[in-house]
Image (cartoon, grey):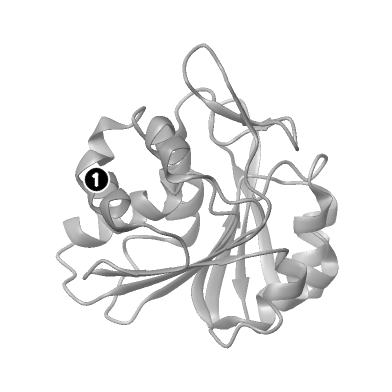
Amino acid sequence: MADQRAELTWTEDQIPVSDRFDDPYFSLQNGLEETRHVFLAGNDLPARFAPGFRIAELGFGTGLNMLTVWSEWEKAGQTTPLTFTSFEAFPMVPEDMARALAAFPELAPWADRFLARWEGGSCDLGTLHLEVIEGDARQTLPSWAGEADAWFLDGFSPAKNPELWGADLMQKVAAHTARGGTAATYTAAGFVRRGLEEAGFTVTRTPGYGRKRHMTRAIRV
């Protein structure tokens, strides 16, 4: 396990904020709806679901994105495993995950199953094969042997966590994306979009969630 854990402060309405990056883990308005708007709709999910589908993510955080897409996978009637790989430098302890996820009772059936089994690393949940790779993604992603059909780019704000948005890392994301695969993120920062374009993605700026005017969608051509 990694030596460094997430250091948190909790807002009055029980939203975890990273002390290291001074940024909340999910939308102050509605984290679940933001995940659906940005990462699911941004990757044309669940319409693209098919047996063997693979998702990769930068920034596991509370596990909210994973739980949201896993719940939609099962609701869509998929019975084979969804593969979900996430890269996380500062993992959150399960107790803090549980506290954060309590804000989303709609996901409780999936959160309960996940938290009952989760000890870090890999976890087989039947219809979900989860792997969280701990450490700096700039070091861990290049040696990853996998490939994704969809990416959730969900690091902390590029202004506060630029390490997770650099052009070199976007090149590695592209190298681990299937042809025709997609990526989506809540940010529309120019340097992020340029990095994705330089890596071989076709990039579009689309309406964001809530107060965020724009977000980014990308397709590997």
- In this view, the residue farthest toward the top is 12
What type is the residue that disc 1 sits on?
Asp
The residue drawn where x is 63% and y is 47% is 5
* Residue 140: quadrant of the picture: bottom right
Residue at 75%, 37% in the rendered image = 20
Name the side, left or right, on which 59 lies relative to 52.
right
- Relative to 115, residue 48 above or below: below
Residue 24 vertical placement versus 127 (above, below): above
**Mark 1 element type:** helix
Q: Measuring from the top left, give residue 168's x and y in whole percent.
A: 83, 72
Q: Position of residue 115 (x, y in %)?
A: 32, 49
The spot of residue 11 in percent (x, y) is 56, 17
Q: Is residue 40 left or right of residue 51?
A: right
Label 1 neighbour load within 10 Å: few <14, some 14-19, many 20+: few
Residue positioned 36% across, 27% down in the render: 103
In this orientation, which residue lies closer to the viewer: 128 or 34? 128
Q: Quadrant of the N terminus?
A: bottom right
Q: Nearer the viewer, residue 125 or 53?
A: 125
Q: Position of residue 183 (x, y in %)?
A: 58, 64
> From the viewer's perspective, is 211 left or right of 53?
right
Please state the total of marks drawn on the protein image. Answer: 1
Residue at image coords 61%, 45%: 186
Q: Nearer the viewer, residue 141 or 123?
A: 123
User: Which residue position is annotated with label 1?
Assistant: 112
